[in-house]
Amino acid sequence: MTPHQYASIRAYVGFTDESTEVLRSFHPLVAPKARAIIDDFYAAIEAHPDARAAITGGAAQIARLKTTLLGWLDSLLLGPHDLAYLEAHSRIGRVHVRISLPQEFMFTAINRIRKHLNDIALRSLPLGSPEQAATKTAVNQVLDLELAIMLDTFREDLVDKMRARERLATIGELSATIAHELRNPLGTLGSSLFLLRKRLETLQVSDPLLDKHHARIAHQVQECVTMTTNLLDLAREKPLTRRATFVAEVVDETMRQIIAPQDIHIHLNIPVGLQLYGDPDQLRHALANLIRNAVEALPGKGNIEVSAGHLNESIHIDVSDDGPGVPPELQRRIFDLLFTSKASGTGLGLALARRVCEAHGGTLSLEPSPVGARFRITIPEPAADAQRSVV
């Protein structure tokens, strides 16, 4: 939602600075009852199977979410209801989108909060007084504003997905044709480079300049091979071949594909014995795209860390770097198909990596980081009975 749209919605529901002051005055009456409101809110979620399905982290996640919701309720009443408020509450909406919370539950959740707040106004303020009427009006206005913000995050997601599908439909057939046509000459180049290297070794010819240019050509050929592979993967839906696999094996085999400058150091922090249930080939492809992306983001030197662990009944693999990071204005677009901020980028790597993660029922996200960028692959762990059958 743009600042102009936010201002327009505020005007439409009649929300003003006076509304903020009324809500701030109401906050002391709500604060003692806030914990009970939140407990009732999550009791209703836990009682409904479809709503509960969006919360995969069990009791521990619900405990964290209760704390978050308490903060949200304070922010709702205390404001200030400015552009910083819009951005903070939009982030909450995007979390709802990311965990696939059905929109109908978002509507009913807001209305459950509305009922509690209106009940407090009814019981705690003089019946029929101007203060009570103004409070109920302000509560309804701010919750209508909140609904508009939440709905806009769902709209953003829908528009992004439609745009990605349109682009995929446009370039799918063409990209597959081009990739197939390029594979033959690239294969010939690769074979010729290999034979040339062998011939030089047989003749015992050693020339540093020749070696340097040979390595450059080989690297560029590999880049083109990677690009054609991405184009082919873009044009087809490759089914998953799932199996239990050690994360360390996926990472180690991925690292064999990575060529990084001497001054870029890649550190691995993978727990021994950590397993996931997925397609190791496709996950290697996704992870390789993330690591190459991190290498390209660094100015010729720096550090990259690949780490993994358990998180909310899922396995996560993080790729972090200490580069310049992703500018805030680009963060929502970096996963869009064909979007790139690099002069020589294709806009395929992150889009394809996200597709692999979503095919596994997981996510690929850009996580907050004090320095550089941190991308996180999250793959759900199988249920206990499935786990026994694959380990």
Image (tube, rainbow, N blue to C red):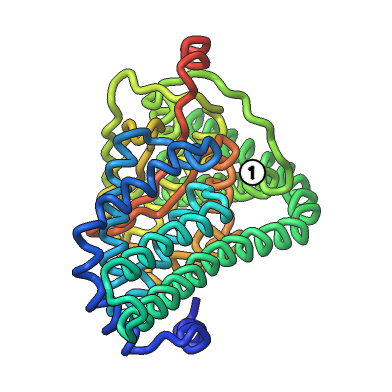
Is residue 208 visible to the viewer in this orientation of the structure?
no
- Is 111 situated left or right of 86 in this image? right
Front residue (pair 126, 309): 126
Position above or below: 151 against 100: below
Q: Residue furthest front?
A: 127
In the image, residue 25 lies at what x, y percent? 22, 78
Q: Which residue is mark 1?
A: 229
Q: Residue at x 50, y 13 (%)?
A: 385
| x 61%, y 59%: residue | 337
Name above or below for residue 250 compared with residue 12: above
Report how many numbered discs are placed on residues in the image.
Answer: 1
Q: Is residue 180 left or right of residue 363?
A: right
| Depth order, front residue of 115/296 | 115
Which quadrant of the view contains residue 297?
bottom left
What residue is shown at x 31% (from left), y 62% (from top)?
A: 72
Q: Nearer the viewer, residue 96 or 176?
A: 96
SS class, disc 1 = helix
Q: Is residue 144 visible?
A: yes
Q: Quadrant of residue 92?
A: bottom left
Residue appearing at x 80%, y 50% in the figure: 177
Looking at the image, residue 19 lies above or below residue 310: below
Image coordinates of residue 193 in percent, x first then y, are 58, 40
Report x, y in % for residue 247.
Answer: 40, 26
Q: Position of residue 57 (x, y in %)?
A: 37, 35
Q: Is residue 243 above or below residue 204?
A: above
How crowded pointer 1 is (Cα within 10 Å; few <14, some 14-19, many 20+) is rated as some
**Quadrant of the rendered image containing residue 21:** bottom left
Question: Tag 1: residue type?
Answer: Thr
Closer to the camera, 235 or 156?
156
